[in-house]
Image (cartoon, helix red, strand yellow):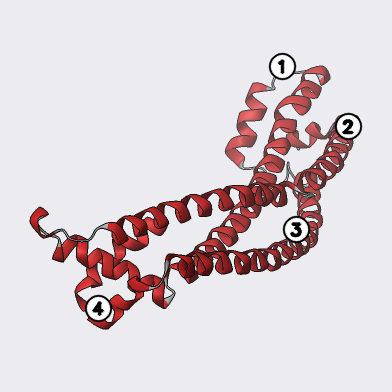
Amino acid sequence: SLQNECNNAKDCALNISNEETAEIEKTDEWKENEWNKWKLKLEDNWKQFNLSLIKEKNEWIQNVTKDWNEWMQNMQHKWTHYIENMDESHKSHILEKSLTWNNADWENWVNTELKGLIDNEWQNWINQIESQRYTWIEDKWVHWRSYQILTWLKSDWKHDENICWLRKEYIEWNKPSKVRNTGGWLKWKERIYKQSLEWLYWVQNKEKIIQNIKCSGWIRWKDDKNKIFNQWKECFLNNWIREEKWNSLFN
């Protein structure tokens, strides 16, 4: 934040030459104009960032669709060979509790326990993908906006002005009796406060757009794939019941 920059500047206040105090003497109008010019450039940079983020998001959707197709193939293979690849202890547990079961009991097991195992795999996979998507977009956004505000805070005149006033606060004005000519200092404080509020408001407005980018296209994609997954799952489970696949446990 703007205030954090001032806090960080305390450490180097002693190293600033007297010549750099001239930055304080620039007019308030000039400083305000510099801030306004920076905001205009910020908007241009934002437009470019927004377009690039949307493009990368669309490319990400294409890539995750390939991952989805591969995942579905793996699911088909895994659950088709579920019994033959079953852990022996788990197999023994199922056999033990199913000693008195009839076909209706097995159908109930397929539609509850087996279905639950398959559903859990889907939820785990889609939650991981969704988390990766949101984290990736958020990281991009945080990094970009941090860089943008630093271009303002680290501009030569702005940085030097902050250092000059901080030196007065923490070195020259170390006693109340030494405080002199605080009018410029108060304007500096007010300017930092005003710019901090404007920056916060700008970020909050853009945050709404970022949230839309996170969700745009993704909810529909997820719903479409969820429907396909459920269709495959129901077909798979119905086939299990029709062919009484549980009998393979006794072989």
Mark number for residue 230? none
What distance separates the C-alpha of mark 4 from that of mark 2? 78 Å
| Horizontal and vertical percent position of residue 38 | 56, 68
Q: What distance separates the C-alpha of mark 1 from that of mark 2?
A: 22 Å
Q: Which is more N-terminal, label 2 or label 3?
A: 3
User: N-terminal of the two: label 4 or label 3?
Assistant: 4
Q: Give the residue at mark 3.
A: 64
What amino acid is at disc 1?
Thr
Tell me, for residue 100, which label it has, or none: 1
Tell me whether the residue at label 4 lies in contact with that at label 3, contact meaning CB atoms closer than 8 angstroms. no
Figure check: 82 above or below 106: below
Residue identified by numbered label 4: 16
Type of residue at label 4? Ile
Which of labels 1 and 2 is toward the front? 2
Query: Mark 2 and mark 1 in contact (Cβ < 8 Å)?
Result: no
Q: Nearer the viewer, mark 3 or mark 2?
A: 3
Depth check: give the residue in front, 120 or 23: 23
Which of discs 4 and 3 lies nearer the camera? The answer is: 4
Residue 165 x/y as whole percent: 27, 65
Secondary structure beneath disc 4? loop
In the depicted view, which residue is nearer to us: 108 or 24?
24
Task: Give the CA separation, mark 1 to mark 4.
Answer: 87 Å
Q: Residue at x 67, y 28 (%)?
A: 95
Label 2 Cα crowd, 10 Å radius (few <14 / some 14-19 / many 20+): some
Classed neighbour count for the residue bearing mark 4: other residues with Cα under 10 Å, few (<14), some (14–19), many (≥20): few
Q: Which residue is mark 2?
A: 238
Where is 69 relative to 85, above or below? below
Which of the two discs, 3 and 1, sits closer to the camera? 3
Q: Is residue 15 visible?
A: yes
